[in-house]
Image (tube, grey):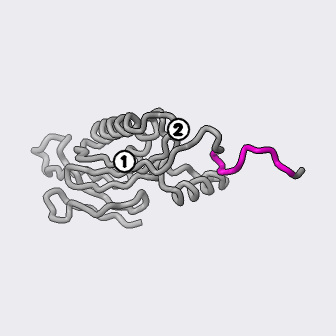
Amino acid sequence: MTSNTVSAGSPNASTARKGPDAGHTTTVGAGATGAAEPAGTRGRTSIADVVVVKIAGMAAREVPGVHDMGGGLSRTFGAVRDRVPGGRPNVGRGVKVEVGERQTAIDIDLVVEYGVPIMDVARDVRENVISAVERTTGLEVVEVNISVDDVHLPDESDEGGSNAESRVE
């Protein structure tokens, strides 16, 4: 995993869209140096893209009506990963971010529960994600784009199987 530190004011402070495992780090506070400076401003603060991805993912999952996150293939791999002993759930699945010097943009792929007003869920997710990311990182969230990829129906099992009785013993 690589770590690229981009100094504040650098022309490279903005990055391309990254996934949760991209390993990119952006410096968001280039502090001053020297004994004459206040202690709170000595040094730099860097926030990795994966930090913003995880915060946004957790905030989106907190909203009622969100069943899952990620596209179809991403959810399939996630289901396999969750069943492997020792495997950890990927809270950043379905989240992509672009982190700049002082701002971030976030894209989220959702699966919503059947019957919930999709526009209301999207609004609530957007508000919760913006609040959590801005409060936690200090970055300004310029946009949260939400794509609803699927609707979870009440009779669908999470395992993708059928609820019908088995024909064999």
- Give the residue number, with chain letter if any, for mark 2: 114
What residue type is disc 2 on?
Answer: Tyr
Q: Which residues are magenta?
A: 158-167
Image location (x, y in percent) of residue 67:
52, 41
Return the residue found at the far left: 36
In the image, residue 8 above or below residue 115: below
In the image, residue 116 above or below residue 98: above
Return the residue found at the far right: 169
Q: Residue at x 17, y 56 (%)?
A: 8
| Quarter assignment of residue 135 | top left
Q: Pointer 1 and pointer 2: residues touching (CB < 8 Å)?
A: no
Image location (x, y in percent) of residue 39:
19, 41
In the image, residue 35 above or below residue 77: above
**Marks 1/2: CA–CA distance:** 17 Å
Q: SS for tag 2?
A: loop
Q: SS for tag 1?
A: strand
- Give the residue number, with chain letter if any, for mark 1: 146
Check if residue 55 falls in the magenta segment: no
Q: Nearer the viewer, residue 88 or 164?
A: 164
